[in-house]
């Protein structure tokens, strides 16, 4: 799934139009790829993409990804919450290994 979008959110008319356009244009040639590269270097779009500048804008941007998550916490939040537990388990594993090898 492109861009993390669900199949349910894609407009079938836009999908079929995109496929039809790709069939008409054909694959991207090396010359076409070079033309795109030169245009990007000329216009430098990455310099104009600043993102949110205010605290309110940053807070809103942080919430944007929460719209499609399935539970109350994202996968990243769950992993961060479990990090101390994982660290403790790793320490226990190392201690057990040292006991078995007689290193303690």
Image (cartoon, rainbow, N blue to C red):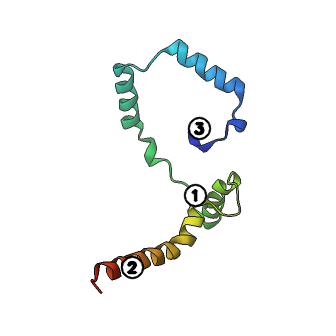
| Between discs 2 and 1, the one toward the N terminus | 1
- Mark 2 or 1: in front is 2
Secondary structure type for disc 3: loop
Residue carrying label 3: 1
Mark 3 to mark 2 CA distance (whole Å): 43 Å
Taking the image as shown, residue 9 lies to the left or right of residue 27, namely right
Mark 1 to mark 3 CA distance (whole Å): 26 Å
Category of crowding for the residue at label 2, using alpha-carbon neighbours closer than 10 angstroms: few (below 14), some (14–19), many (at least 20): few
Mark 2 to mark 1 CA distance (whole Å): 49 Å
Secondary structure type for disc 2: helix
Q: Quadrant of the N terminus?
A: top right
Which residue is painted at 41% across and 41% down in the image? 44
Which residue is painted at 64% across and 41% down in the image? 5
Q: Residue furthest bottom?
A: 104
Category of crowding for the residue at label 1, using alpha-carbon neighbours closer than 10 angstroms: few (below 14), some (14–19), many (at least 20): few
Residue 74 is situated, as x and y percent measured from the top left of the image, at 63, 60
């Amino acid at each position: 799934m492109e861009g993390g979008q669900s199949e349910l959110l894609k407009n079938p008319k836009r999908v079929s139009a995109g496929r039809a356009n790709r069939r008409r244009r054909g694959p991207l040639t090396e010359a076409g790829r070079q033309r795109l590269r030169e245009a990007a270097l000329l216009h430098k779009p990455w310099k104009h993409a600043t993102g949110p500048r205010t605290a309110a804008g940053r807070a809103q941007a942080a919430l944007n990804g929460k719209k499609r998550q399935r539970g109350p916490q994202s996968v990243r939040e769950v992993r961060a919450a479990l990090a101390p537990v994982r660290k403790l388990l790793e320490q226990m594993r190392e201690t057990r290994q040292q006991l078995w090898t007689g290193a303690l």
